[in-house]
């Protein structure tokens, strides 16, 4: 398997988070473990509320990673009875847990030094064009008002 760069790993982590979200997983988080863990650079942690949802989230991630990124998990661990599924994609480790297991193992607290990353990359919002038009309209209105004030002053001096 070719070595991926850190940015590609982050993109894969975000993709896994998105696929989990597509199956209504809850409380999805990405932790940056670079420099903190020898086993993984990124953790994706999410909650599935039932065994069928646990299965659905796992299957969605596996299928879409294969279809869209041409990659299968290096490791699949856990079973539905354990209520904790782990998928490993190189330097990305995905944890799908039931609420009880997530609370019990508290991975976010265990890796509390790890910064949490945004689930998506948001593009900067461009300035709306209406602001420019409003400024132009205000300037035009000021120009129109100026002659009217001059006319008023002339009447007052007569």
Image (cartoon, rainbow, N blue to C red):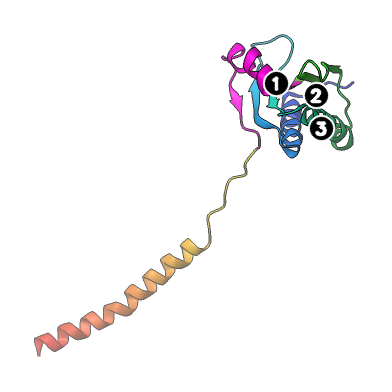
Say which of marks 3 and 1 sits in front.
3
Say which of marks 2 and 3 sits in front.
3
Which image quadrant for residue 52? top right
| Residue 100 numbered tag | none
Residue 89, visible in the rendered structure: no
Pointer 1 residue: 42
- Magenta-drawn stretch contains 51: no
Secondary structure, mark 2, is loop
Closer to the camera in the image, 83 or 112: 83
Q: Are marks 2 and 1 in contact (CB under 8 Å)?
A: no
Secondary structure, mark 1, is strand
**Crowd rating for badge 2 (residues with CA inside 10 Å; few <14, some 14–19, many 20+):** few
Which image quadrant for residue 34? top right
Upstream in the sequence, badge 3 or badge 1? 1
Pointer 3 residue: 56
16 lies above or below 124: above
Pointer 2 residue: 4
**Magenta region, residue range:** 93-120
Residue 151 pos. (x, y %): 21, 86
Residue displayed at 62% across by 17% down:
103
| Left or right, 148 with reference to 62 | left
Residue 29 pos. (x, y %): 64, 27
């Amino acid at each position: 398997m070719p070595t991926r760069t850190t940015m590609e790993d982050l993109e894969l982590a975000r993709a896994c988070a998105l696929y989990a979200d597509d199956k209504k997983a809850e409380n999805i988080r990405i932790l940056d473990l670079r420099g903190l863990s020898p086993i993984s650079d990124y953790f994706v942690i999410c909650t599935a509320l039932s065994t069928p949802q646990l299965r659905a989230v796992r299957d969605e991630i596996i299928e879409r990673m294969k279809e869209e990124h041409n990659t299968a998990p290096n490791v699949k661990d856990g079973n539905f009875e354990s209520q904790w599924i782990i998928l490993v994609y190189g330097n990305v480790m995905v944890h799908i847990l039931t609420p009880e297991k997530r609370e019990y193992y508290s991975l976010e607290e265990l890796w509390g030094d790890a910064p949490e990353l945004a689930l998506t990359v948001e593009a900067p919002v461009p300035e709306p064009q209406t602001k420019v038009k409003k400024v132009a309209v205000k300037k035009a209105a000021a120009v129109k008002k100026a002659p009217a004030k001059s006319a008023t002053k002339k009447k007052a001096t007569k």
